[in-house]
Amino acid sequence: MKTIILHSQDLTIAQLVSQQVGADIQKKRTHFRFTTDKIIDLNALRERFKLDFNIVPESFSASQIGLLVSDMDSTLINIECIDEIADFANLKPQVAGITERAMQGELDFDSSLVERVALLKGLDVSVLEQVYTQRLQVNPGGKALINFLHERNIKSAVVSGGFTYFTDRLAQDIGLDYSRANVLAVDNARLAGVTQGAIINAQAKADFINELCQKHALDVSQVIAVGDGANDLAMMKVAGLSVAYHAKPIVAEQADIAINVGGLDKIMDLFDE
């Protein structure tokens, strides 16, 4: 038997879905569920109703979850920070094009990051503050999700191929337990055009999950990983449950759960059993 989640509180739509899939409606606090043994075309439901639908993996146990790890740019927050930094050098279209291709999986992440960071050389470090305060916003439902996790003593972390200036500050501002990202090198209060230390790429993100699991005596099956780009796939494969959030097609196709319409708080629906 499969359990389908309709990430909506619209009873009329729930009734239509019930008729279409031939299953009784189960009303939950924030959404509706349906249980059926029929073959379900999720994409057809998503296309018809323009809402989020997911099948809960049989292996998922909400009570066992101990850690959620999220990508930052375009997942936990609304922007790609490196693109916005580049805007101050009048290079946003050029950098954003490279970012997009990297997130689609068309470019090697490490070399694309090196190329983009080099284009930032010479910018005053004050642009980082401007990007954070003027352009960066937590995506809808993000703060509610983090508060929800805290209430259940579930650890939370952000890991990014972006930069520690943003991940560390974001973690402090919204109450994340851990953060990891690349370190931008600075020379005389200007960006040096390089990063310091090992690049936080796809494998480093997966390694971060394993590191946190060891720290808290968790199995990877107790982890939810959330991402949107190709460099998130490795950590999503490691985690017990993977969530694609408004993601690139290559990611949405491989994730256990896809949120394409609603906010990050829709992840909370998985816990309302």
Image (cartoon, rainbow, N blue to C red):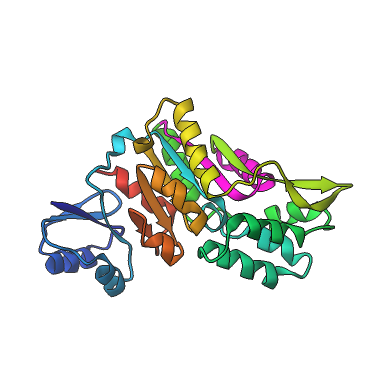
Can you say whether 222 is above or below 106 in the image? above
Residue at image location 55% in from the left, 51% down from the top: 72
Q: Where is residue 150 in the image (x, y as percent from the top left)?
A: 45, 35
Q: Where is residue 36 in the image (x, y as percent from the top left)?
A: 12, 56
Magenta residues, start to end: 153-175
Query: Is residue 178 placed above or below 228 in the rendered structure?
Result: above
Q: In this view, does 210 lie above or below 261?
A: above
Residue 81 visible in the displayed image: no
Is 37 within the magenta? no
| Residue 145 seen in the current view | yes
* Residue at the spot 68% in from the left edge and 72% down from the top edge: 93
For residue 74, what is the image quadrant? bottom right
Towards the viewer: 94 or 149: 94
Q: Is residue 197 left or right of residue 22?
A: right
Foreground pick, 12 / 239? 239
Q: Is residue 63 above or below residue 125?
A: above
Which image quarter: residue 86? bottom right
Q: Residue at x 45, y 46 (%)?
A: 235
Q: What percent of the width, then of the height, locates residue 132?
A: 68, 53
The total number of labels drawn is: 0
In the picture, measured across the screen, residue 266 lies left or right of residue 26, that is: right
Q: Locate residue 55, reporting x and y percent.
A: 25, 55
Q: Quadrant of the C terminus?
A: top left
75 and 208: which one is in front? 208
